[in-house]
Amino acid sequence: MGINEKITEVEKHKGLILYKEGIFYKLYNKHAMLYYVNYNEFKINVKFYKNINQLVYSIGFPVASFKQNVFGSKK
């Protein structure tokens, strides 16, 4: 799935959409900004994509961070 399809999906949905990319899950554009404004825990990455002529905002979460539940024990 290319960046154009990801950005289009993000614009359609109200809930957060996490995309698995290698060892990270990523949030894009308004979902990344929504997470950042509410939690301010991760750095926002900004990249200009020539093929869609647009700045894209993203936040990446390591996949390993999802292997623990809120109490810190492994699933």
Image: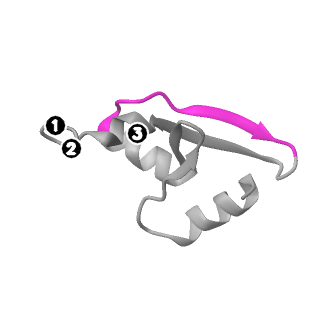
Q: Residue at horizontal 39%, vertical 35%?
A: 64
Quadrant location of the N terminus in the rendered image: bottom right
Q: Residue at horizontal 12%, vertical 39%?
A: 71
User: Residue 35 location, x and y as percent?
Assistant: 39, 45
Query: What range of the chain is rendered magenta?
Result: 39-50
Give, as a three-letter code, the residue at label 1: Ser
User: Mark 3 or mark 1, which has the lower sequence index?
Assistant: 3
Dot 3: within a 10 Å radius of its alpha carbon, few (fewer than 14), some, or many (20 or more) residues?
some
Q: In this view, does 62 lie above or below 6?
A: above
Give, as a three-letter code, the residue at label 2: Asn
Q: How far apart are marks 3 and 2 (CA)?
A: 21 Å
Q: Which of marks 3 and 1 is in front?
A: 1
Which residue extends farthest right? 51
* Mark 2, residue position: 69
Badges 1 and 2: C-beta atoms under 8 Å apart?
yes
Q: Which of marks 1 and 2 is in front?
A: 1
Q: How far apart are marks 3 and 1 (CA)?
A: 26 Å
Q: Residue 73 carries which label?
A: 1
Q: Residue at horizontal 75%, vertical 58%?
A: 4
Q: Is residue 32 above or below residue 65?
A: below
Residue 18 falls left or right of residue 54? left
Give, as a three-letter code, the residue at label 3: Tyr
Q: Residue at horizontal 61%, vertical 66%?
A: 9
User: Mark 3 or mark 2, which has the lower sequence index?
Assistant: 3
Q: How far apart are marks 1 and 2 (CA)?
A: 6 Å
Answer with the quarter of the image where residue 16 lies. bottom left
**Helix, strand or loop at disc 3?**
helix
* Mark 3, residue position: 36
User: Residue 58 location, x and y as percent?
Assistant: 57, 40
Badges 3 and 1: C-beta atoms under 8 Å apart?
no
